[in-house]
Image (cartoon, rainbow, N blue to C red):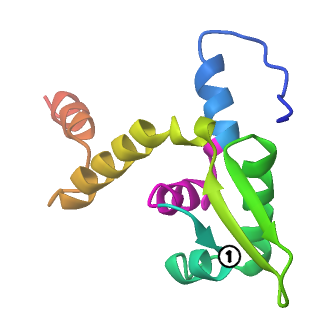
Amino acid sequence: MARHKTYDCSAGCPVSATLDVIGGKWKGLILYHLLEGTLRFGELRKRIPDVTQRMLTQHLRELEESGLVHRQVYAEVPPRVEYSLTPQGQTLRGVIAALKSWGETYLGRKDPEPAASKRRLAVAGR
C-alpha cells in the first residue's frame, strides 16, 4: 500500500500532491513509456538513455511505493524483473497525454518568448 504524505489542503493542495508523486525529471518519462505496456529494467534504460541506473531504480521504487507501478520478479537465473502500470497508474494516461501534447506545442513554437512577456514589454514601452 502506498504511503501518503500529509498535506495542508489549501487551494493548490491537489496540484502539490500530484507533483510530489509524478514530478521530477524522470518519473514522467518512466510513466510515459510504461503506458505502452510492460517493460524490463534494461528496456526502460534504453528508452531513457540519459537516466543513470541509480536514478531509474530510485524513481521506480518511489512510483511503486506510490501505487502507480507494479514490479514483477520472476524466479529465473538470471532474475527477470518487469515493470508495468497498476490500475491507479493507468489513470494517469490522460495527464501524460496532455503533458505530451503541451510539450509538442511548446517545442513547435518558433518564438520561445511567451506572449505575456511581449505584452508586458509593449505596455512598459508606451
Left or right: 101 with respect to 66?
A: left
Residue at (85% x, 90% y) in the render = 77
Residue 4's place in the image compared with 115, above or below, is above
Residue at 43% in and 45% down: 96
Residue 49 position, x and y percent, is 55, 82
Main SS category, magenta section: helix
Left or right: 67, with 109 as reference point: right
Q: Residues within 10 Å of mark 1 (few under 14, many from 20)?
A: some
Q: Amino acid at mark 1?
A: Phe
In this orientation, which residue lies closer to the viewer: 121 or 92? 92
What element does badge 1 sit on?
A: helix
Q: Which residue is mark 1?
A: 41
Q: Quadrant of residue 109?
A: bottom left
Image quadrant in which the C terminus is located: top left
**30 left or right of 124?**
right
Residue 22: percent from left, percent from top: 62, 44
Q: Nearer the viewer, residue 54 or 81?
A: 81
- Does the magenta segment cover residue 90? no
Q: 13 or 111: which is nearer to us?
A: 13
State the image quarter where residue 58 is shown.
bottom right
| Left or right of 37 in this view: 122 | left
The extreme bottom residue here reads 78
Name of the residue lying farthest toward the front: 75
Percent coordinates x, y for residue 37 in the rendering: 50, 61
Query: Which range is magenta?
Result: 22-36
Q: Is residue 112 above or below residue 77?
A: above
- Count of residue discs: 1
